[in-house]
Image (tube, rainbow, N blue to C red):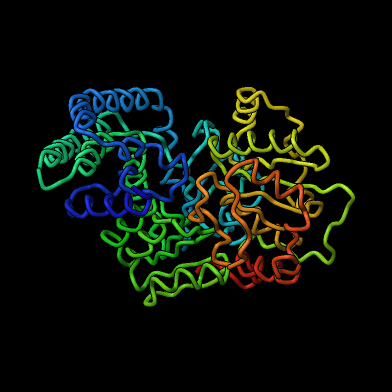
């Protein structure tokens, strides 16, 4: 079964229960087929009657484990309930829903919206993806910005948590009953059972908590528009459906900030549920053109991106070729690239290999990964992104934005995916026609004949690379605002 076929099955099963509260369930919202996002579906590729029966027997124990986790977190996070401060936020015309992650540097521009977001004139609702305590998050920002900020709590009062689980238990039982219907094949039966379990998962409950807190906030500040990051996640669908149903007077302006890949199922799914009066903002013309092919009835504007890089006047040339690697913001991706660069550095000592770590990875996570893989920290770049791009010849990537940003410096992108699929390649839409690499041996062989990897050998000159970079991440004009 391909990821595309899995996506079709998930959509089909969700359509069987049109009035059920399934939108928060992350299991039914496959964003894109990365290894980490496909992990919950691994058994679907080897479904059997024995596995189905085991899943049925373990269903209620697994649900109870999730309930106990929720109860425990609710008790531990009681302090956050006291620091929920929606009534202290000074209302603004625009509410922006963004993320507080390790990529967010205190005092700097927003890591997702960049210069499009101004904490002095916008209300910002941050989803907290770190372990920083809720009550301490405001301390990262100046006093003049704090009055416009609010941070998501990671739980609700215990009584509300239990009531949600009870309500979802009725839905889970219904899903479980459907898994016995003979009209479904083994794969769909397993998916139904797993959906029933995941309805009580931490991720699903977190999306439901988000919906509840967002409802409270919208009632309190009454914004004219809401903007959110747009990648295809379940919480985005939760927000869109909530506003359309209960706050139809609010305009939604999602912002596609990160590169879109060919198999990014979630973003197309969420695109379909936008209303004609909503307005989609993109990072550049290439993504605008791509998304416009699916919705001609809504306004799609190229708002630009803070990832825009001024084209370099000269391409870096040195006796020793430098190759940077751009891992994504997950532990799985980081460790794949650490293994790859360990091999390349050992086999090709005449080249410099440096791996850039995604800012969403914490220092602790990086240390643990290096220790687990017995890797030397000297492999990790300590330079700024611009320094690395300005002194590199090649960039090995999968779906990282670094490869696109590197085009402005004349850095040749080399796509690496162990599956050899182009489904996660954001530069696929640029029609660069560069080779796809699936393992270290293939990259080693190509690097031994570097002339075959030169951009010019593929009919792509520096000016063309810079043009493509600007079309993916265009410059934000001085008059651009989230409107």
Q: Position of residue 396 (x, y in %)?
A: 66, 49
Q: How many marks?
A: 0
208 left or right of 80 in image: left
In the displayed structure, 306 sits above or below 321; it is below
Residue 349 seen anywhere in this rendered image of the structure: yes
Q: Position of residue 414 (x, y in %)?
A: 65, 53
386 left or right of 140 in image: right
User: What residue do we see at 62% from left, 25% from top?
Assistant: 373
Q: Position of residue 411 (x, y in %)?
A: 74, 58
In terms of depth relative to the viewer, which is nearer, 448 or 466? Answer: 448
Residue 327, by quadrant, is top right
Residue 234 seen anywhere in this rendered image of the structure: no
User: What residue do we see at 44% from left, 56% from top?
Assistant: 263
User: What residue do we see at 10% from left, 43% from top?
Assistant: 181
Q: Residue furthest right?
A: 319
In the displayed structure, 445 sits above or below 278; it is above
In terms of depth relative to the viewer, which is nearer, 205 or 269? Answer: 269
Q: Position of residue 331 (x, y in %)?
A: 55, 35
Residue 63, by quadrant, is top left
């Amino acid at each position: 079964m391909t990821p595309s076929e899995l996506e079709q099955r998930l959509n089909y099963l969700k359509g069987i229960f049109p009035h059920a509260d399934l939108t928060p369930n992350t299991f039914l919202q496959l964003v894109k087929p990365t290894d980490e996002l496909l992990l919950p579906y691994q058994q679907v590729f080897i479904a059997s009657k024995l596995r189905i029966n085991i899943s049925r027997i373990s269903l209620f124990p697994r649900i109870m484990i999730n309930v106990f986790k929720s109860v425990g977190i609710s008790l531990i996070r009681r302090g956050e309930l006291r620091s929920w401060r929606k009534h202290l936020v000074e209302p603004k015309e625009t509410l922006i829903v963004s993320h507080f992650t390790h990529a967010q540097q205190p005092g700097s521009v927003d890591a997702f919206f960049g210069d499009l977001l101004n904490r002095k004139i916008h209300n910002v609702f941050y989803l907290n993806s770190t372990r920083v305590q809720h009550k301490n998050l405001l301390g990262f920002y100046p006093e003049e910005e704090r009055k416009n900020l609010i941070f998501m709590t990671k739980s609700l009062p215990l009584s509300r948590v239990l009531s949600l689980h009870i309500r979802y238990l009725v839905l889970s039982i219904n899903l479980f009953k459907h898994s016995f219907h003979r009209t479904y094949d083994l794969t769909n039966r397993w998916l139904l059972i797993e959906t029933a379990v995941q309805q009580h998962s931490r991720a699903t409950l977190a999306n439901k908590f988000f919906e509840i807190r967002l409802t409270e906030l919208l009632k309190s500040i009454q914004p004219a528009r809401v903007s959110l990051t747009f990648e295809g996640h379940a919480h985005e669908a939760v927000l869109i459906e909530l506003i359309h149903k209960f706050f139809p007077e609010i305009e939604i302006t999602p912002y596609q900030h990160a590169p879109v890949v060919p198999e990014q199922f979630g973003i197309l799914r969420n695109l379909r549920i936008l209303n004609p009066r909503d307005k989609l903002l993109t990072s550049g013309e290439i993504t605008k053109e791509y998304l416009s092919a699916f919705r001609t009835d809504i306004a799609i504007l190229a708002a630009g991106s803070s990832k825009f890089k001024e084209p370099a006047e000269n391409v870096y040339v040195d006796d020793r070729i430098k190759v940077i690697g751009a891992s994504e913001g997950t532990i799985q991706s980081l460790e794949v690239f650490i293994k790859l660069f360990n091999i390349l550095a050992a086999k090709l000592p005449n080249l410099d290999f440096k791996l850039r770590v995604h800012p969403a990875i914490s220092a602790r996570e990086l240390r643990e990964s290096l220790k687990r893989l017995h890797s030397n920290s000297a492999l990790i770049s300590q330079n700024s992104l611009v320094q690395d791009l300005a002194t590199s010849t090649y960039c090995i990537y999968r779906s990282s934005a670094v490869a696109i940003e590197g085009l402005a410096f004349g850095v040749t992108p080399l796509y690496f995916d162990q599956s050899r699929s182009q489904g996660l390649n954001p530069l696929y839409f640029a029609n660069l026609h560069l080779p796809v690499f699936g393992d270290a041996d293939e990259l080693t062989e190509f690097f031994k004949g570097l002339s075959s990897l030169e951009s010019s050998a593929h009919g792509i000159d520096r000016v063309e690379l810079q043009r493509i970079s600007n079309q993916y991440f265009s410059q934000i004009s001085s008059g651009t605002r989230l409107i």
